[in-house]
Image: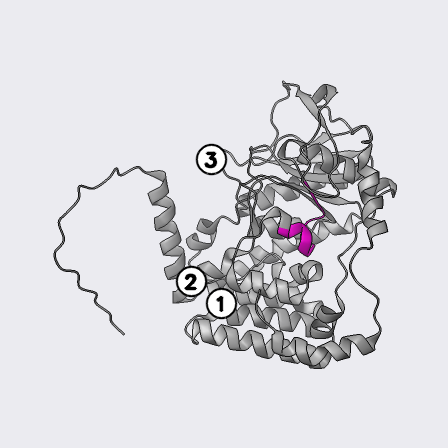
Amino acid sequence: MMRLSSARSVLSRVATRAGRGSASLSSTARMATVARFATPTPTSTTIRYQSTAAAAATPTEETTPKATTPTPFVSTAERKYEYFENVELTPEGVAVIRFDCPGKPVNTISFALKDEAKVLWNQEIDSNGAVKAVVFSSAKPNMFIAGADIFDIKSIEDKSQLVPLIEDGLDFFQSMKKKGIPLVCAIDGPALGGGLEWALWCDYRVCSDSKKTKLGLPEVKLGLLPGFGGTQNLHKLVGLQAAMDMMLTGKDIRPKKAKKMGLVDLVVAPQSVESVAIECASQLADGTLKAKIKKKSWMNWAIEDTPMGRNMMWQQIDKMVEKNAGGNYPAPLKIIEAVQYGLQEPKKRYQKERELFAELAATKESEALIGIFDGMTQMKKHSFGKDAAIPVKTVAVLHIG
């Protein structure tokens, strides 16, 4: 996390005088949350499963629910979609949508997946009055969504064409929200880039404590910025300081920290993620569970939500970017521009984000970084063996520029 100690020392008195109540959960509230899951309610069962048997989930967080381990039922129904398993509906009206990109071990968000998602949503969710909530999950073990398909971007020569393509994707996400039903993500494995952005559009996020689970927005490492609403939606959950740190560094967040910072709502054992998400979706739909955004501490409120504090925060962020990028790396500056613009012009925030994304995609810096990423990806697919050791007597380092 970027250090804002200079701002904190000045603003501590401002926060105290403001008289805002403590933002942390009280011990009573935490105990109530634990009690709600201490005696598990029967989880809803999708048509994929026959009988269920109780199985204790490994305790991972103070709000860990206990779930049932379903007995798989092999469906003979013909698969209707290329990038998704067939949608399943629980008796309580929870539709379960599982990502399953064909022919590869990872899920990525491509323009083709986005187009099929629109068809699926229109046919199976929007037109079905029986659907009371939706859970997004994955059919691949230890894999939610690894990010956007970067080769979609690479294949488009005129990067200005990305603007309407991204706009179409954002229209889809906004149509999901307009349905007015709870949206829940069951995250097991990587939720990176576009995968985390998809989760940010949801109302509730259940995450596994698997070692393979990580959350982040690494677009800056490709010379890009989050283009599916990430620059506008992330800070609503975790605050401006944490959001800027995530986007400007591209670092991964582990489940326990994600829960602490408000990025996810629950952390559970991997085998329980989907069943707990289904139960949460059902409770959100019937009103017995409420999605809540983590409240800010006095200090974070003073830094992020007062004119003086926010001005000092941006000054510190600008200094950090200048020190690390030296004006030679446009992506961090565009990320800052996108967030600041969204705060000032909220009605045009997503339009600005996609325009800046297209600008970055056309830069030589992004082209070079994507090329490096492509090369590293190809190397991982092939085993070249170990080269024979070569005796080295002298090493020279050549620096140009």
Q: Residue 246: percent from the left, percent from the top?
A: 57, 60
SS of the residue under disc 1: helix
Report the side of 101 relative to 367 (left or right).
right
Tell me if I can see residue 79 in this picture.
yes
The quadrant of the image that shows the N terminus is: bottom right
Q: Which residues are magenta?
A: 257-267
SS of the residue under disc 3: loop
Question: Does residue 390 belong to the magenta stretch?
Answer: no
Is 78 drawn above or below residue 163 in the view shown? Answer: above
Q: Which residue is mark 1?
A: 331
Q: What amino acid type should be assigned to the residue bearing mark 2?
A: Ser
How dense is the environment of label 3, judged by Cα within 10 Å: few (below 14), some, or many (20 and up)? few
Q: Which residue is mark 2?
A: 366
Count the marks.
3
Q: Which residue is mark 3?
A: 104
Q: Residue 76: percent from the left, percent from the top?
A: 63, 18
| Residue 79: mark | none
